[in-house]
Amino acid sequence: MAEFKPIIVYNQRLADEVHRQILLAITGGIIAPSDRIVQEKLAAEFQISRTPVREALLRLEQEGVLVTAGRGGFALRLISDEDAREIYSARQSIEGYSARLLAEAKDEAAFERIAEVIRVEEARQVTTAAEYYEANKAIHRTFVLQTGNRYLLEMFDLMWNRSISFHVFASTMSGSALAESLRAHLDLLDAVHSGNGDVAARAMREHIAQGLDLQLNAMSATERNGKTQRQG
């Protein structure tokens, strides 16, 4: 596992910054499923006390990102097919309802803010799983953010954090495939812009269902690759 850099924080809680950096390390593939995460080692690398590191690790465990790994350590929580289905189902509820609220609110300024984020993120040169994850999350989070409902946003963040260990994209999809999967969000926005709540909610749920299919295929391919390597 690669070393972290010292943390210098002025206007943010140390535990929040540790939490953020660990999440970035996971999406970037720096923390692998086989790695054991030890608070003493992290505290030394960040050059801070163990207390905020411990707080961040326990928060990540509570969010379903990490699991305890013995002797006070933690490890990345691996996701089963059933976990994936349940997470995506929860996302359909949260984001589908958000799409309905946006459609019925008919706030043109909100639609334009969403469109701008989509244009920026879809224009990125996506070549890695981490880049895909961040671009896709930014787009979907903006849909929820523009509802103005902070509790929907809180639930959104929780579900996306739980799915962070879908690291399998890194080994099963090319950069071009990842980029291609981002190019449906303007069509999704058109459905929301229709002003019809039923149409908007259905479009969002179908979009997320397509993402689930992509995820399950990637997980299956990774499992097959792992079996082939072990047999070889």
Image (cartoon, grey):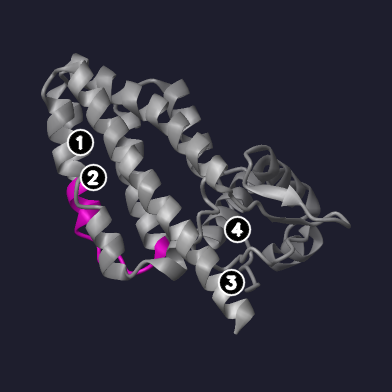
Callout 2, which amino acid? Val
Q: What segment is highlighted magenta in the picture?
A: 117-129
- Residue bearing mark 4: 8
Q: Is residue 199 left or right of residue 48?
A: left
**Tag of residue 113:** 1
Q: Which one is nearer the viewer's eye here, 183 or 228?
A: 228
Badge 2 density bin: few <14, some 14–19, many ≥20, Cα 10 Å: some
Callout 1, which amino acid? Arg
Q: Which one is nearer the viewer's eye here, 228 or 52?
A: 228
- Residue bearing mark 2: 117
Residues under labels 4 and 1: Cα distance?
32 Å
Q: Which one is nearer the viewer's eye here, 212 or 70?
A: 212
Q: Is residue 124 positioned above or below 196 on the image?
A: below
- Residue bearing mark 3: 227
Q: Residue at x 28, y 64 (%)?
A: 177
Callout 3, which amino acid? Lys
**Where in the figure is residue 130, as x and y percent of width and height?**
43, 61
